[in-house]
Amino acid sequence: MSTFLQYLIYGLQLGSVYALLALGYTMVYGIVGMINFAHGDFLMIGALGTYFIAQIFTRFQVNSTFPMLIVGVIIIIAMLMTGSIATGVEAIAYRPLRNKPRMIALITAVGVSMFLENFPRALSFIGPNPRSFPTLFSTNRFSLAGASVSVTQIIMISLAAVMMVALYFLVNRSKVGNQMRAVSMDKDAAALMGINVNRVISITFFIGGALAAVSGICYASAYPQVDVYMGSWLGNMSFIAAVLGGIGDIRGAMLGGFILGVAQIFATAINSTLGYAVGFIILIVILLFKPAGIMGKLVMEKV
Amino acid sequence: MNVIKIGKKALPVVIVLAFYWLVMLLKSMGIVNNYYIQVMMFAGINIMMTASLNLVNGFTGQFCIGHAGFMSLGAYGAAIMTTMVFHGKSIPLAAQTPVFLLGLLVGGCVAALVGVLIGLPSLKLKGDYLAIVTLAFGEIVRAILRLIKPIGAARGMIGIPNYSSLAWILLFVMLTLYLLRNLIYSPYGRAFIAIRDNEIAADAMGINTTHYKITSFCIAAFIAGVAGGLYAHVLAFIQPDSFSFTKSSDFLVYLYAGGSGSLTGSIVGAVLLTVLPEVLRFLSDWRLAVYAVILVAVMLFRSEGLCGGKELPFLRIHRTSLYEGPLFGRKKKTGQNQSRS
């Protein structure tokens, strides 16, 4: 039982990383209708950016840990920075292609992803070598019903939950959220109603990038190593999570992320390669029975 | 007149033969070394992969982003056949060719069979969801190959005889292009294009869309399997991780940068983008960043691909000469029927 609980906690920890990243995928897909393959690299930029921001703040360190206030500042700077980069990528690479076939934008996204991985790699002060991530959160452990839980894990899972609730209210209760939902339903009609579609899409990418940064900080706090390629497979898994939950649906992305995280940890406990494959197997099984994911609605094509 | 026609038909063969002769001449002069020849061989394999992907993505309008999965099945199928069943390194020279061809055939058939198996349930899914399933398929194949101990698991398979030569690859590239060109301009190809342009309308016209989609998947998987077999016998070493999603996305990039729906585009895309990273080697660390910038620039400024909607003469059949015969024949028949009734 305590082993089960232990795995469940690890699963939720990984799941919160996936869920935060999947939110970005699902929002971009819901509003622009493209799969942003570069989204995983926003996670990398968030984590790597946090590493360098934390370096600037080193003199605030007490006993080689940061005070909570500074951690908050670091996270917010990283979120703003990654969000701005995401918005910039959208403006430069995706906006000119918005009315072209979707595959074109997807290939551009592959190109952008390659650039985002290899440009920092070529910069001499970043380079290809992995770096150890600073400890932002306390690593104290305590035992809960026989399972050992660290403060980092609690902070990660609750941070993810807070972000998701905030996003849910932003999309469903605020004016910007209203506009987002309008654009996702019908871009042209929304534009006719006086909504600035470009602005809404920029905001969507900004939020997606900011969430990816949080996700990157969470991941790097749990597995404290950052390098320029860390985003690509995490991005793939989160994409799977988004599809699993029903791409385009915010609750689906959260659910899919947690399901995938927990399933992956339990399968990894059996065999490490199986852990990697289990996500894809779950995906295929669910898509065969519910072709639009768990939460997604199948849209009938009309002539 | 007849001589000119035959001459026109033989021209691509002559060009390829001349190319091969030139390469061999330059090699004997020492200008072209083995590294260049290996790049050419990879370019050829990439042409096969891209052209077969073009059949699914460009002509049938489906959305396969796990093509490297079929390639890995073909590579492992062929390598198991030549290395483990026939012990390719220790057999006499005369027996090598049939064993190699048998291996390629087995690799292609394994890939095609799995193509049908994966196609049957997943072609119910449309658009992006199909894409995800093909992606998942490619990764599952990779994960399974990593688990099988006798073929080296994650460490990969070594000791594969290096049977592939530039001549073999050129031959298979030509066969692939010949097959695909004739397929695309056949009734099958017109059905594929009809499905791409509007699936509902194609269905309404009586085209069995599921059948044609699976056929297209199956043929593409077969070609990808053969290409994988060739790949295994170039490198003499394969490992599951070299057929990851990155590889699949490479083929997608070749396809769409070259121009989807155009066989010429597949050739141009595959050759240019295989050679470009090698040419850019002098940039060392900046190589892939520059490559990515070039790729994004191509997509931004020529988003239909380099050869979008264009075909070289020998990859094109003139529409008029294609339709004139049967159309006139049918007209006469209907005329006769009308007079009879």
Image (cartoon, coloured by chain):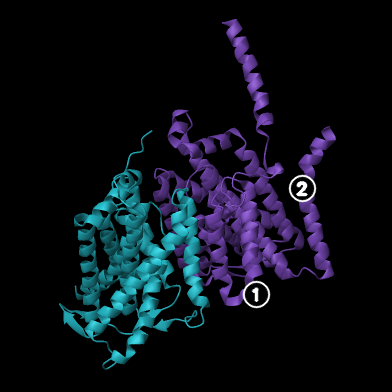
Chain colours: A cyan, B purple
Tell me the chain of label 2.
B
Say left or right for A153 vs A216.
left
Crowd band around label 1 with a 10 angstrom C-alpha radius: few (<14), some (14–19), many (20+): few
Q: Judge by depth and name the residue closer to the eye, B206 or B287.
A: B287
Element carrying mark 1: helix
Query: Residue A240, located in which quarter of the rendered image?
Result: bottom left
Q: Residue A264's mark?
A: none
Give me the disc on residue B13: 2
Q: CA distance from mark 1 to mark 2?
A: 35 Å
Asked if one can make out residue B230 in the rendered structure from this viewpoint, the answer is no
What kind of residue is marked 2? Answer: Val
Q: Quadrant of the N terminus of chain B?
A: top right
Q: Residue at x 51, y 35 (%)?
A: B194
Q: Quadrant of residue A142?
A: bottom left
Give the mark, 1 or 2, whose residue is nearer the N terminus.
2
Label 2 neighbourhood size at 10 Å, few (<14), some (14-19), many (20+)? few
Q: Position of residue B169 (x, y in %)?
A: 69, 56
Look at 27% across and 89% down and name the residue there: A65
Quick one: SS at disc 2? helix
Q: Residue at x 80, y 67 (%)?
A: B27
Left or right: B179 in relation to B124: right
Question: Looking at the picture, does residue A177 appear above or below residue A262?
Answer: above
- What residue sits right under mark 1 in the picture? B282
Q: Quadrant of the C terminus of chain B?
A: top right
Numbered disc total:
2
Q: Amino acid at mark 1?
A: Phe
In the drawing, does residue B83 fall left or right of residue B119? right
B129 lies above or below A221:
above
From the top left corner, tell me how far across and down residue B192 is, in percent. 53, 38
Q: Residue furthest front?
A: A194
Q: Are marks 1 and 2 in contact (CB under 8 Å)?
A: no
